[in-house]
Amino acid sequence: MKTDGSALIVEDLHKSFGKLEVLRGIDFHVREHEVVCLIGASGSGKSTLLRCINLLEPIDRGRIVVEGEEITARGVDVNRIRQRIGIVFQAFNLFPHMSVIRNVTLGPTEALGLPRREAEALGDELLGRFGLADKREDYPDRLSGGQQQRVAIVRALAMRPDLMLLDEVTSALDPELVAEVLNVIRELAAGGMTMVIATHEMGFARDIANRVCFLDEGVILEEGPPDEIFSRPQQERTQRFLQSIIEAGRM
Amino acid sequence: MSYAGGTPPPAGSGVDPALPDGDRGSRILAPLRTEGVRGVTIAVLSTVVFFTAIVVAVVNSSGWTEIRGAFFDGEVFREALPKIVDRFGLNVFIFLVAEVLVLVFAMVLAILRSLVGPVFFPLRLLAAGYTDLFRALPTILVISLLGFGAPALQLEGIPTSKVFWAIVALTLVYSAYVAEVYRAGIESVHPSQVASARALGLSRRKTLRYVVLPQAVRRVIPPLLNDFIGLQKDSALVSVLGVVEGLNQATILQFENFDFTPFVALALVYVVITIPQARFVDWLIARDRRRRQGAVGV
C-alpha cells in the first residue's frame, strides 16, 4: 500500500497508561517534506504521540503508517522501523561514556552495519554542517546544552531517517541557547526534511510549520496553517491556550 | 580557627583548591590546601606530637616486652617473610584466576537476571536462586565441600586438585556477590539511555552491550574492588584443605619458632597488596571523570 505523498498517517490512535487515557483517538497525516508542529498544554499527549510513532510505546488501538508501511502491524521488525524514524528528546539523552563522534556513529555502525570509516565520514560531514566539527572528540558532559542538543540532532540525522520527530527539543535549554538549536531545525526544514515537532516555541512554530495541530486532552482539537491557528483559532480551548501563552510573554 | 572541611577559600582565589577533581584519596589532605604554609606547619607538628605520644605510651606499658617478643621479633620476621611470600604466590594464583572467572560468570548471572519478558522467567528464576543460595552459604563450607568432596568421588574426568576446587568454590561464592553489584549498576543506568539507543534502531542486545553495560561497569568499579579484596582475603580459607599457601606456611613457622611473628608478616603482605589496588581504582575513577568533564566551559 503506497500512499502517494504521505510520509506519515496516524489513524484512531489510542494509548493509556494504566487508567489514564493519554491519547483518545488521534487522526492525522504528514505529507513528505512537510513540517507539522504539535502545540498544546503539558499533558495534552504531544510527547506520547511522538513516542508512539517511534514505537517506543506500544499502542492500544489504531494504526500508524510510515511511507506506506503499516508499522503497527504484527510481526514488524521494530528495529528496522526505528532506523527510518529519527527522534530527538527534550533531555538530549546523549551517551555520556562516548565521544561526540562515537555518539553519532553508533547507530550507523551497529544498527545499519555501515563500515566505521564510512560512518565517521558521514558523521564528520554532519558535525561540520552544524558547526560542531571541533567538538568531535569531546565527551557530552563538556558541551553546553545547545551543543549537546545539536549533537543529538546530528546523531538522529546520521541514520538518514525518512522522518524526524522532535520532542520539545529546546525546553531544557537556557534561553540564550535556544536560537542555535532552532536554526539547525530551520536548516533541516529548508532541506526538505519531513518533521513532526512538539514545541512550546510559538513564534518558531508559526515561522517554520506548514501546519499546526493543537492537542487537547488526547485529541487533535484543531489544525490548520499557522496563520489560521494563531490569528483566527476557531475552538474556544485553542483561544484560551494561546491567550495564556501570550500572557506568559512566550509569543 | 580550624581547618575542618567547609572553611571557604580566600575570596578572589578564583578556583576552589579544596575540591580536587574526584580524588577520594586526598580528602584527608584537601582542607590543608586552603590553609597555606601556616596550616601545614601546625598539622605536621600536631601529627608528630600525637603519634609520638601513642608510641611512647605503648612502649612503656607493662607488657610491651612480651608483646614485642611474641609478635614483632625481628629475626623471626626476616626469616619468615621470604618463605611466606613464596607460598603466598599460591594465594595470588588462586585469587587472580578466580577473579577473572568471577568477572565473566557474574556478568552472565546479572544479564540473565535483567532479561525482560515472560519467556525468560526460568532463567531469571535460576539466576535469582543462584545468588540467594551462594550468598547464604559460608565460603569455608563451600571450599570444604568441593575441596574434600569432589576429589573423594574419584570419578573419571573430575579433577582431584584441591587448588582447582578451591578456585571453583571461590568463583561460585563471589560470583553471587558480584552479580548483585553488576545488577545494581545495570539498574542505575537511566531508562532514557535505553530509549535513545532503541530509538536509533539498536537491538536489545546491542543496547546492552554498547550503552548499558559500559556505563554500569564504570559505576560499579569501587564496589567491585571491594568484593575482590574480600575474595583475596578469603583465599586464606583454602588453608582448611591442607594446601600450604600463605596462612598454612605462617602456621608452620609459628610452630617452628614458638612465635606469632609469622602471622604479623603475613598480615603485612595482605596490607601491602591491598592498598595499591585501592589507590589504583581512585586513579581510574578520577581519570574517567577528567576525561568526561575536563575543563569547565570549553
Image (cartoon, grey):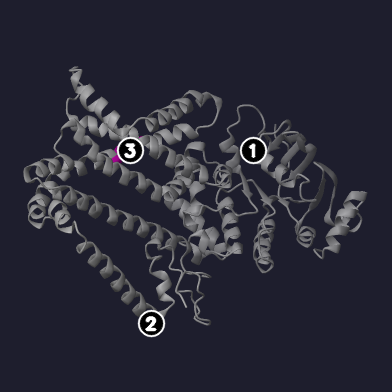
Residue B120 pos. (x, y %)? 50, 26
Please state which of the two labelled residues, at mark 2 or mark 3, is closer to the viewer: 2
Type of amino acid at the residue the image marks with label 3: Val
Label 2 vs 3, first from the N-terminus: 2
At x 79% / y 62%, what residue is drawn? Answer: A203
Is B100 covered by the magenta stretch?
yes
Same chain? Circles 2 and 1: no
Magenta residues span B99-105
Same chain? Circles 2 and 3: yes
Residue at numbered disc 2: B38
Residue at numbered disc 1: A55
Q: Give whichever of A161, A250 is nearer the camera.
A: A250
Q: Main secondary structure of the magenta part?
A: helix
Q: Is residue B78 left or right of residue A102?
A: left
Q: CA distance from mark 2 to mark 1?
A: 64 Å
Secondary structure of residue under mark 3? helix
Residue at numbered disc 3: B102
Query: Which chain letter matches label 2?
Result: B
Q: Is residue B223 above or below residue B168?
A: below
Q: CA distance from mark 2 to mark 3?
A: 50 Å
Q: Is residue A118 above or below residue B36?
A: above
Is A180 covered by the magenta stretch?
no
Q: Are marks 2 and 3 in contact (CB under 8 Å)?
A: no
Q: Give whichever of B106, B143 is nearer the camera.
A: B143
